[in-house]
Structures are given as structure tokens and as C-alpha cells.
Image (cartoon, rainbow, N blue to C red):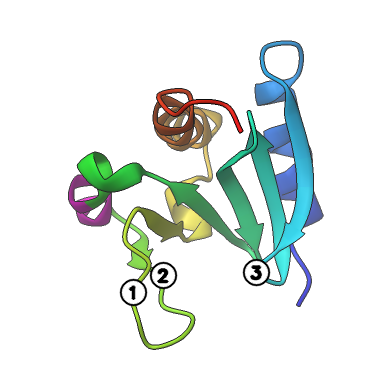
Amino acid sequence: MSFDETLAERLRPLFRGKYKVTEKKMFGGLAFMVNGHMCCGIVATDLVVRTGPDAFEHALKRPHTLLIDFTGRPMKGFVYVAPAGYHSDHKLKSWTKLGLDFVLSQPPK
């Protein structure tokens, strides 16, 4: 599966110079890893955000989000965000911040 390279280009500057970020192919898409933890990613045109357990239910209530379910078992702590949910720079930054808030609360790998 491919991923939206335009979205990747929008995400990269949000991390540049602030965090040690690596990109890794995962889930048939691209993941942005911060301190060794997946922060967010892209599958096809959807943004994947790692919310962590505490922000998960609230994130699912936001518009244009879906539960991630690859194998018949939902992945708690992660949500898909459809393009309409991250179309503005403000919304994309908001989702990225949610992922960063969680991964930066974890010890580095």
C-alpha cells in the first residue's frame, strides 16, 4: 500500500529541529518515530495518530476519526484521521501535538 507523500511533506517540518524523528515503513504506510516510539503516520491518505490510552476515547469523538482495526481486534490508543480532519495546518498541528504529547511522556527506547 502506498501513502500520501504530500501529507508526509506537510508533517516533516512540524518535527524538524525540535525532535529526533525517524521515518519507518509500517502498516503499509509511513510512520514518524519520536524517541523510538510511533507518534503518527500515514496509511493511504489517512493520518494515523498515537493518542495513548488516556486521550483515545476523546480523540475518537472528534470529527473524521475512525478506530484502527487491522486484524479484527481494535488498536486502542491509535486513531485514523480522514483527510477532512487534517486539511488545515491548524488541525494537522493539533493532531501531531496529541501524538507528541503521548510519546514524549514515554521513556525513550
Q: As rendered, which of 96 and 86 lies closer to the eye?
A: 96
Q: Residue tagged by mark 3?
A: 27
Label 1 sits on a secondary structure element that is loop
What crowding class fits label 1: few (fewer than 14 Cα within 10 Å), some (14-19), or many (20 or more)?
Answer: few
Which image quarter holds the C terminus? top right
Q: Which residue is at the far bottom? A: 72
Which image quarter holds the N terminus? bottom right
Q: Quadrant of residue 35?
A: top right
Q: Main secondary structure of the magenta part?
A: helix
* Number of numbered discs on residues: 3
Q: Position of residue 16 (x, y in %)?
A: 75, 19
- Magenta-tinted stretch: 57-62
Q: As rendered, which of 88 and 99 lies closer to the eye?
A: 99
Q: Residue tagged by mark 1?
A: 74
Residue type, numbered disc 3: Phe
Q: Residue tagged by mark 2?
A: 68
